[in-house]
Image (tube, rainbow, N blue to C red):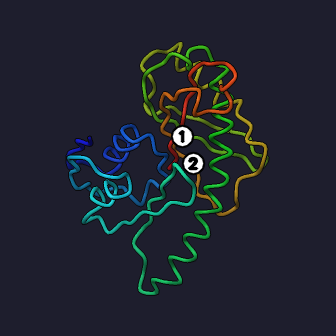
Amino acid sequence: MLDIPSQALDVALKAFGVATQVALFYETGVVSGRRSFPVHGEYPVDAALRVMLKGTGLSSTSFDRGTITILAPAPSDVASHVKRTKAGLAEFSSYLALVQQSLDQAFCRAPVATTDPDDFVARVWISPAGNVQRAELLPGTGIDARDRVYMSALTRLSIGAPPPAAMPQPINLMLMPKKSRGSSACMMQGTESRSAAHE
């Protein structure tokens, strides 16, 4: 049962991601300044998102199971533009899956992350070598010691591959609790990891 009122679209998408445990991929500028349509009731995930995006001019699609990508309005050459956009976003989705795997591994080793119930947003810049060269917490967890643990984990993150040249940066990550059965990184430990929704 979803109960998400009309509000700033970025806030509504965060609530949607938490409620459905679906990873949402979108560029911050695409949703900025838009308002969501209210969603109340029981819907399949894709139908609920279509309701939420009503009137925004945005659409959604899925390239991988458990992920949904928000698409900007297409210009007059709809077919060719959508085809190019999907091809590019599919490439980014594969790379962002690597980012999520690296995050799971990093936070699996951070004791505070295994019990922390809070959701928060981080922003990272990835170097051509595939390492996080800069990270920020937005606005932070509210506890300095906990922030330091997360910042340390983020800044030590190594993706193991360079980011696609055309991928927009920084990457905004919504971090949320996730049971270990959903994370191969922590599967053997029986603990909780952290999951991410990417922008």
Does residue 169 lie above or below 176 as drawn? below
Does residue 125 lie above or below 150 as drawn? below
Residue 11: percent from left, percent from top:
32, 44
Q: How many marks?
A: 2
- Determine crowd level at label 1: few under 14, some 14-19, many 20+ residues with C-alpha closer than 10 A: some
Identify the residue position indicated by label 2 in the image: 170
Quarter holding residue 51:
bottom left
Q: What amino acid does circle 2 point to?
A: Pro
Residue at coordinates 51% horizontally, 48% vertically from top-left? 66
The disc at residue 105 is none
Residue at coordinates 22% horizontally, 41% vertically from top-left? 3
Q: Quadrant of the N terminus?
A: top left
Residue 121: percent from left, percent from top:
47, 35
- Distance of label 1 from label 2 (alpha carbons): 6 Å
Residue at coordinates 23% horizontally, 50% vertically from top-left? 39
Q: What amino acid does circle 1 point to?
A: Arg
Does residue 11 lie above or below 189 as drawn? below
The disc at residue 123 is 1
Marks 1/2 in contact by CB < 8 Å: the verdict is: yes
Residue at coordinates 41% horizontally, 43% vertically from top-left? 17
Q: Nearer the viewer, residue 79 or 165?
A: 79
For numbered disc 2, what is the local secondary structure?
loop
For numbered disc 1, what is the local secondary structure?
strand
Could you tell whether 189 is left or right of 72 in the image?
Answer: right
Q: Nearer the viewer, residue 187 or 153?
A: 187
Query: Residue at the bottom extreme?
Result: 77
Residue 102: percent from left, percent from top:
68, 36
- Determine crowd level at label 2: few under 14, some 14-19, many 20+ residues with C-alpha closer than 10 A: some
Could you tell whether 6 is left or right of 124 in the image?
Answer: left
Sequence-earlier tag: 1 or 2: 1
Does residue 73 lie above or below 136 as drawn? below
